[in-house]
Image: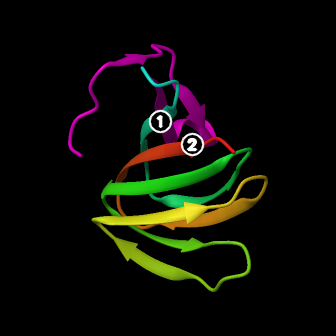
Amino acid sequence: MSKIQNATIVKAANIYYDGKVTSRTVELNDGSIQSLGIMLPGDYTFGTNEAEIMEMLSGELDVKLPGEEWKTLTTPETFNVGANTSFDVKVKTVTDYCCSYIKA
C-alpha cells in the first residue's frame, strides 16, 4: 500500500540517536498506530512494547532479530518483531520505513 488514508498524523517528530532516526506517528481511524520514518546509516538497537511489522520502503540494512543471525535486507522487504524485546540494525543506506504496531 503506497498511501495511508483516513488517518491523523501527530505533528511532533519522534527523534532517536541524535536525529539519525526520525519518525512520525500515524493514527488510523480503526485505532491502529503506524509510524513513518527515516534511518540514516549507522548501528542502532530498538526496543519494542508491542509486536511490530517493519516495512522497508527504500534502503538497505542488516537486521538481527532475537534468537536469529544477522541478515541483509533490501527493499522491498518486511520483517516482524515480537513484543517486549529488542532488535539491532546496521543501516547501510538511507532507509525509509513504515512500522505497524500490533496490539495483542
- How many C-alpha atoms fall within 10 Å of the one at disc 2: few (<14), some, or many (≥20)? some
Name the residue at 47% across, 55% down.
Answer: 54
Image colouring: rainbow
Which of the labelled discs sits on residue 51, or is there none? none
Q: Amino acid at mark 1?
A: Ser
Which residue lies under the disc numbered 1? 35
Can residue 45 be found in the magenta stretch? no
Q: Is residue 24 above or below residue 53?
A: above
Q: Residue at x 50, y 23 (%)?
A: 13
Marked residue nearer the N-terminal end (2 or 1): 1
- Quadrant where the C terminus sits is top right
Q: Is residue 30 above or below residue 35?
A: above
Instruction: Give the quarter of the image for residue 103.
Output: top right
User: Which SS class for mark 2?
Assistant: strand
Q: Nearer the viewer, residue 18 or 96?
A: 96
Camera-side residue: 89 or 7?
7
State the mark number for residue 101: 2
User: Quadrant of residue 7 in the image?
Assistant: top left
**Percent x, y for residue 18?**
60, 37
Q: Nearer the viewer, mark 2 or mark 1?
A: 2
Q: How many marks?
A: 2
Q: Residues within 10 Å of mark 1 (few under 14, many from 20)?
A: many
Q: Which residues are magenta?
A: 1-27
User: Label 1 near label 2: C-beta < 8 Å?
Assistant: yes
x and y, in percent, of residue 23 in the image: 47, 34
**Side (left or right) of 79 relative to 3:** right
Tell me the element at label 1: strand
Kind of residue sitting beneath label 2: Tyr
Q: Position of residue 89 (x, y in %)?
A: 57, 65
Q: Position of residue 77 (x, y in %)?
A: 35, 67
Residue furthest left in the image: 2
